Image (tube, grey):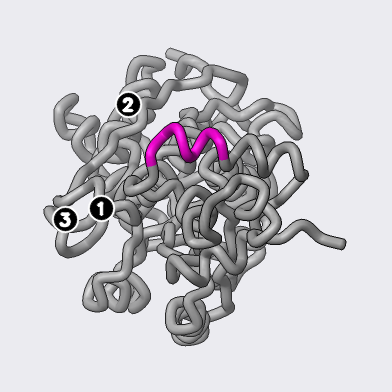
Amino acid sequence: MAITVKDVAKKAGVATSTVSRVINDHPSISETTKKKVRKVMDDLGYVPNMTARNLGKRTSNAVGVILPPLDSKERLGNPFYLEIMEAINDEARLYDMTTAIATAKSFELLLENVKRMHLQKQVDGFILVYSDSADPVIEYLYENQIPFTLIGQPYQHENNIVYVDNDNQLLGKQATEFLIQNGHQNILFVTNTTHESLYFERYFGYQKALMLNQFPTFPSVVLEKPEDYLTFNDTLAKTNATALVVIDDIFALRTMQLAEMYGYSIPDDLSVVSFNNSIFSTLTHPYLTSIDIDISELGRMAMQKLREIIHDELSSGVRMVIPHKLIKRETVIPLAE
């Protein structure tokens, strides 16, 4: 037969309520009593029912990880989300917590999923792994005072939201400066999104680097619709571009394939710098020069900060900036004189 709380209480010579308080590490119980009860639990092989314990505490001991709408092949296959979920899960395990995933193909469905998880008390809080200007989820969490942290920079309530991020403007600036140091002046910024916070920040950094060096800036090259791909060759020719800064690794590979289809050689005709330093950066030749944003640390810190919020250890908005580094590979070469 399974060992019960009553069995532990009887052998320890205490009330069942005392055993429950020991299980929950209640401060009203002395350390001496805690040690005695825990020894009896070990001797009997008693394992606390965590589900019942959490119901009593009105907690789930779980966190929800909210992914952006997976509405494109790039997002579905982007290793960023898998790597960051793994980091969050590893950190949660240190606190005896589990993770649940919230995802959908649209923001409307995603909001429904998050509401359901919250109202059914499936999780104690949430981590958003994206920041999007069209996102209704973050406003729902903020307005209802639900514990959450954000990976990325919020568009509103910056002083009241705890968020973990890289300095994406600095990333964009340093990626562009690296190309400038290699003799490039006509540099384009290529993206497949125009409503995420990291796009704005990285594009601003790109513009800043060029303006500081008194080189021309160009509108971002947005490749979202099929017709955008048809005009890419015209854009390269019109701008005399010799280098590209691309929003992330997986889209950089697609951009490189597109350029090669139009007769450009990478890096002989076009140098390329990207971001994330994902597994895709070394899957094909030439290996991709990319900025490592330390995805694991982003996930770890987001989980750590969420736990602090859940336990009332934070009282105001905090921004955690995760360092980055440029990984030089094969897609950037000095511009020939």
Residue sitting at 38 percent across and 45 percent down? Answer: 29
Q: How far across and how far down the image is residue 211, in percent?
A: 16, 34
Dot 3 or dot 1: first in sequence order is 3
* Residue type (three-letter) at the residue carrying disc 2: Gln
Measured in 3D between alpha carbons, the distance from the residue under mark 3 to the one under mark 1, in whole angstroms, is 19 Å
Q: Considering the image in quadrants, where does the N terminus appear?
A: bottom right
Vertical side of 21 occupied by 34: above or below:
above
Please report contact status of discs 3 and 1: CB closer than 8 Å, yes or no. Answer: no
Q: Main secondary structure of the magenta part?
A: helix
Residue sitting at 58 percent across and 78 percent down? Answer: 105
Vertical side of 139 occupied by 212: above or below:
above
* Residue type (three-letter) at the residue carrying disc 1: Asp
Give neighbour class at mark 3: few <14, some 14-19, many 20+ (Cα, 10 Å): few
User: Where are the magenta residues, as a range?
Assistant: 30-36
Image quadrant where residue 269 sits: top right
Residue sitting at 47 percent across and 39 percent down? Answer: 33
What label sits on residue 174 in the rendered view? 2
* Residue closest to the eye, 30 or 315: 30
Vertical side of 281 occupied by 100: above or below:
below
Please report contact status of discs 1 and 2: CB closer than 8 Å, yes or no. Answer: no
Dot 1 or dot 2: first in sequence order is 2
Measured in 3D between alpha carbons, the distance from the residue under mark 1 to the one under mark 2, in whole angstroms, is 38 Å
> Residue beneath label 1, please?
312
* Residue type (three-letter) at the residue carrying disc 3: Glu
Q: How far across and how far down the image is residue 305, in percent?
A: 34, 45
Residue 29 horizontal side relative to residue 79, left or right: left
Q: How far across and how far down the image is residue 309, in percent?
A: 30, 53
> Residue beneath label 3, please?
158
Residue 131 horizontal side relative to residue 23, left or right: left
Residue 75 horizontal side relative to residue 219, left or right: right
* Residue closest to the eye, 186 or 81: 81
* Residue closest to the eye, 37 or 107: 37
